[in-house]
Amino acid sequence: MELEDVSDISESLIDEVSKAIVGKRSVLQKTLLGILANGNILFEDYPGLAKTLLSNCFARTLGCDFKRIQFTPDLLPADITGSFIYDKNTGDFKMRKGPIFTNILLADEVNRAPPKTQAALLEAMQEKQTTIEGETHTLDNPFIVIATQNPIEYEGTYPLPEAQVDRFLLRLDVGYPSASDEVEILKRRKDRKTDDVEINRVTDPETLIDMQNKIEDVHLDDDIKKYIVNIVQRTRNNKDVEVGSSPRGSLALMKLSMANAAMRGRDYVVPDDVKFIANEALSHRLVLKPGPAIKGVEEEEIINQTLKAVPVPKVD
């Protein structure tokens, strides 16, 4: 596989998913960046904005196994990971795998479940493995979690701990469609005469793994590395920020920038690759001080200010 193949396949994937998701090409690109960088993705938005449909469509175009877990206050860790059940015929206990054994897992409304259940997902996200009654089991490859959560002010939610939020490679929001896009959504539904959208398979899990591996060949100049670190370091020294981005944020921004370069057919990273995905890679890792938060300052504003303040390197 060559980097040109990564770019061509990526374009085909986004075109195919765009049949179902109208007017959100940038969101689709950034979702695919997370998948190519082999990271977990957090969608934070209100219900009804096609987050589930988007996740399902990507799984179908990638030829990946897809499972969905609806997180609720009474969901138990075993409902995610699986358990051992007694077989009367053999007298043995047999493992019943939970929905976590899949390629793409949609954890829907993850902040509606209590912390103990959220923690069961944390191990799988970080270690690509899960523990069932003391036994450790390796998960499928690829394995990617796409989690959705309601905004914190939405009633009936349990805020995710900072440690768990930090383990998501990027945070995205879909946002409401424009009036013209919403009209197009209605038009397409009327023409189809069904709620189902026909989405074709573009590639397969093995090719996806090859694409993920090929991204490691993208060149990262030392000046770009310093640029990424300077951005992250500056979030830690901002007067409005209580807790800045962790080094995990630097790694996330690096991987996503490399994936963006490959998606655009380049074998090297430029500053625009970093800028394109910086907000999504870093904003969820910041904790604002109470005063600025009460005044309505948002994490995205901090990242935008940081990008303007940090000198941009020249890369030949």
Image (tube, rainbow, N blue to C red):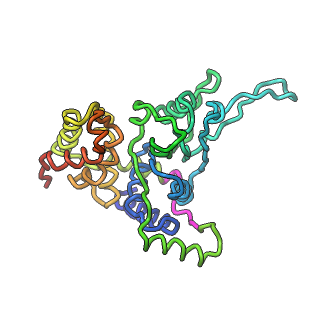
**Residue 234 position within the rendered picture, expressed as x and y whole percent measured from the top left:** 19, 37
Taking the spot 23% from the left edge, 46% from the top edge, the residue there is: 220
Relative horizontal placement of residue 289, taking residue 14 as reference (left or right): left
Residue 275 drawn in magenta: no
Residue 204 drawn in magenta: yes
Q: Which residues are magenta?
A: 198-207
Please tell me how many numbered marks the rendered image carries: 0
In the displayed structure, would residue 247 be above or below residue 253?
A: above
**Residue 316 visible, this orientation:** yes
Taking the spot 36% from the left edge, 57% from the top edge, the residue there is: 2
Of 56 and 298, the residue lying toward us? 298
**Residue 144 visible, this orientation:** no
Relative horizontal placement of residue 11, taking residue 145 as reference (left or right): left
In the displayed structure, would residue 184 be above or below residue 310?
A: below
**Residue 223 position within the rendered picture, expressed as x and y whole percent measured from the top left:** 15, 44
Of 174 and 150, the residue lying toward us? 150
**Residue 267 position within the rendered picture, expressed as x and y whole percent measured from the top left:** 27, 55
Relative horizontal placement of residue 279, taking residue 64 as reference (left or right): left
Quadrant (top left, top right, bottom left, bottom right) of the N terminus: bottom left
Taking the spot 46% from the left edge, 34% from the top edge, the residue there is: 160
Main SS, magenta region, reads loop
